[in-house]
Amino acid sequence: MEMKKRISLELRNRTPAEVEELVVDNCRTSDGEVEGLTDDFKELEFLSMVNVGLTSLAKLPSLPKLRKLELSDNNISGHLETLSEKCPNLTYLNLSGNKIKGLNNVEALQNLKNLKSLDLFNCEITTLEEYRESIFELLPQVTYLDGFDQEDNEAPDSEADDDDDDEGEDGAGPTGDYDDEDEDEEGSEGGEVGLSYLMKERIQDEEDDDDYAEEEEEGEDKNCCVDLPLVIKPKYSSLEVADMFVCHRSPDGINHQHLY
């Protein structure tokens, strides 16, 4: 597909002034020049023209807001001064897989004062002795060359992916903590139910002791006061030591319990 037609399709009912990103990879130019792009793309910030057969950037329009330009796998050999004239705010430039052979071919990039990342991977220039040192010296504004800085630290884009993975792992952590809290709450509720049950059991035991005392007193003289044996309540792990009760029977036939 021709570049002009591809750009027309990528507009998708928008005007050129409304487009901020444009990708026309793998289409074809008729003469190795940029076609279909005009100065009307004044809001364009990202442009990708990968493998479109470019040999020259002479017809590149003025793109004052362009910050990222992908030109890999073309046939560009030099004459890069157009970039500083038409795209003065470039921060990222990918020229990998082109016909860049010597330092003189990239010398024009010195005028791109905001250029931070330059990719020349798979270009003949990378075979030069002390290639990296020479590029960093020639273009001091460049921080990353072929994805790495002078100390071989990877460019931020790659590091961002690692950060996202770490956040995903960290995000899973709190789930376990919440489960532990739920278990603690359930344990607390269970303890309350157990205590209630023990209290009920204690009351039932007291009623049984009263019945036992009444049976012992049957047949005895109603006018005689009888001291029944001391009854010691069972001890429960979560309760106080049982109370001691002494039951007396008075002449009027009414049982009386006294707490000691």
Image (tube, helix red, strand yellow):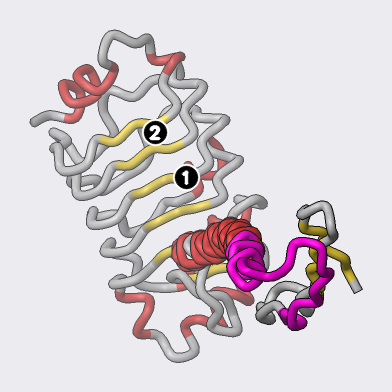
Q: Position of residue 44 (x, y in %)?
A: 46, 28
In depth, the one of 107 and 67 nearer the eye is: 67
Q: Is residue 185 visible?
A: no
Q: Is residue 214 above or below residue 6?
A: below
Mark seen at residue 68: 1
202 magenta-colored: no
Q: In the visual, does 193 lie left or right of 236? A: left
Residue 212 place in picture, x, y as percent: 60, 69
Residue at the image point whose x is 60% and y is 50% from the top: 112
**Position of the C terminus by quadrant:** bottom right
Disc 1 residue type (three-letter): Lys
Disc 2 is placed on an element classified as loop
Residue at the spot 88% in from the left edge and 68% down from the top edge: 259
Which residue is at the front of the view, 149 or 160? Answer: 160
Q: Is residue 71 left or right of residue 156?
A: left
Q: Quadrant of residue 35?
A: top left
Q: Three-letter amino acid code at disc 2?
A: Leu
Write the residue at 48% across / 42% down: 82
Using residue 254 as the reference point, say whether residue 177 is left or right of it: left
Residue shown at 19%/19% (left/top)? 9
Q: Which residues are magenta?
A: 207-232
Which residue carries the number 2 mark?
Answer: 60
Q: Secondary structure at mark 1?
A: strand
Residue sticking out furthest to the left: 1
Residue 83, placed above or below residue 230:
above
Q: Which mark is residue 167?
A: none
Within-10-Å neighbours for mark 2: few <14, some 14–19, many 20+: some
The quadrant holding residue 178 is: bottom right
Q: Nearer the viewer, residue 74 or 257?
A: 257
Within 10 angstroms of label 1, few (less than 14), some, or many (20 or more) residues? many
C-alpha distance separating marks 1 and 2? 14 Å
